[in-house]
Image: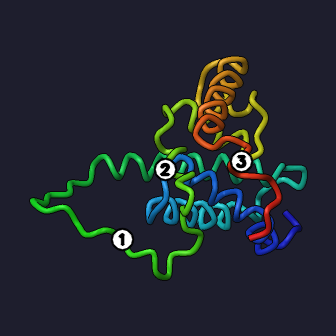
């Protein structure tokens, strides 16, 4: 790949982070998956063919890293008698003021993954179906159901488009 790697990070970093957060939820696991994605991508970068769709490739790498994090999370024991205090929002960029990430995390896994890879990762439904399994129509339906559920939680009248932040 002749394109400098840092340009790929700048161009697709936010997309990869959104995918990681949609799959793993907000927090250090998503951040770790994002970092692991770009570390793996950096190693493979010199051998990547010129005609590769970099964004789609990075989303696939992020998917695999998210699976790795999910497996590691399942093996990790967290013994505790007391619940930890609430995490401080200080110094954490991109807060979840509207609870969007919480709402996305509450979706059934298939809907969450379909939304993550199609709407946030930019993959066509066919490629999303290759990643998460099932038919293109089933993935399209899962994404549609997930978006419908999010629209029920966040009606368009309450959250107008294009509001400057």
Q: Which colour scheme is used?
A: rainbow
- In the figure, is residue 104 to the left or right of 68? right
Q: Name the residue under label 3.
A: 121
Q: Classify mark 1: residues with Cα within 10 Å, few (<14), some (14-19) or many (20+).
A: few
In this view, 133 is above or below 65 = above
Mark closer to the chain start, 2 or 1 = 1
Q: Where is residue 160 in the image (x, y as percent from the top left)?
A: 77, 52
Q: Mark 2 points at which residue?
A: 102
Q: Where is residue 123 in the image (x, y as percent from the top left)?
A: 76, 40
- In the figure, is residue 28 to the left or right of 101? left
Q: Residue at x 34, y 52 (%)?
A: 73
Question: How far apart are the alpha carbons under marks 2 and 1?
Answer: 15 Å
Q: Where is residue 107 in the image (x, y as percent from the top left)?
A: 51, 36
Question: How far apart are the alpha carbons under marks 2 and 3?
Answer: 18 Å
Q: Residue at x 50, y 82 (%)?
A: 91
Q: Which residue is drawn at 66% across and 57% down?
A: 16
Q: Mark 1 points at which residue?
A: 87
Mark closer to the chain start, 1 or 3 = 1
In this view, 54 is above or below 45 = above
Q: Classify mark 3: residues with Cα within 10 Å, few (<14), some (14-19) or many (20+).
A: many
Q: Is mark 3 on a helix, strand or loop?
A: loop
Question: How far apart are the alpha carbons under marks 1 and 3?
Answer: 28 Å
Mark closer to the chain start, 2 or 3 = 2
Quadrant of the rendering where the N terminus is positioned: bottom right
Which residue extends farthest left? 81
Dots 1 and 3: beta carbons under 8 Å? no
Q: In the figure, residue 93 lies in which quadrant?
A: bottom right
Circle nearer the viewer, 2 or 3: 2
Q: Is mark 1 on a helix, strand or loop?
A: loop
């Amino acid at each position: 790949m002749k394109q400098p790697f840092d340009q790929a990070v700048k161009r697709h970093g936010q997309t990869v982070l959104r995918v990681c957060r949609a799959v793993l939820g907000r927090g250090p696991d998503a951040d770790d998956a994002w970092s692991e994605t770009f570390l793996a991508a950096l190693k493979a970068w010199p051998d990547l063919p010129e005609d590769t769709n970099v964004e789609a490739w990075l989303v696939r790498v992020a998917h695999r890293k998210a699976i790795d994090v999910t497996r590691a999370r399942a093996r990790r024991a967290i013994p505790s008698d007391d619940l930890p205090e609430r995490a401080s929002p200080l110094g954490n960029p991109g807060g979840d003021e509207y609870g969007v990430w919480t709402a996305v995390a509450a979706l059934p896994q298939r809907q969450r993954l379909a939304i993550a890879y199609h709407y946030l990762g930019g993959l066509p439904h066919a490629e999303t179906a290759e990643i998460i399994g099932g038919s293109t129509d089933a993935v399209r339906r899962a994404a549609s159901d997930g978006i419908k559920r999010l629209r029920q939680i966040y009606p368009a009248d309450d959250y107008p488009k294009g509001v400057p932040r």
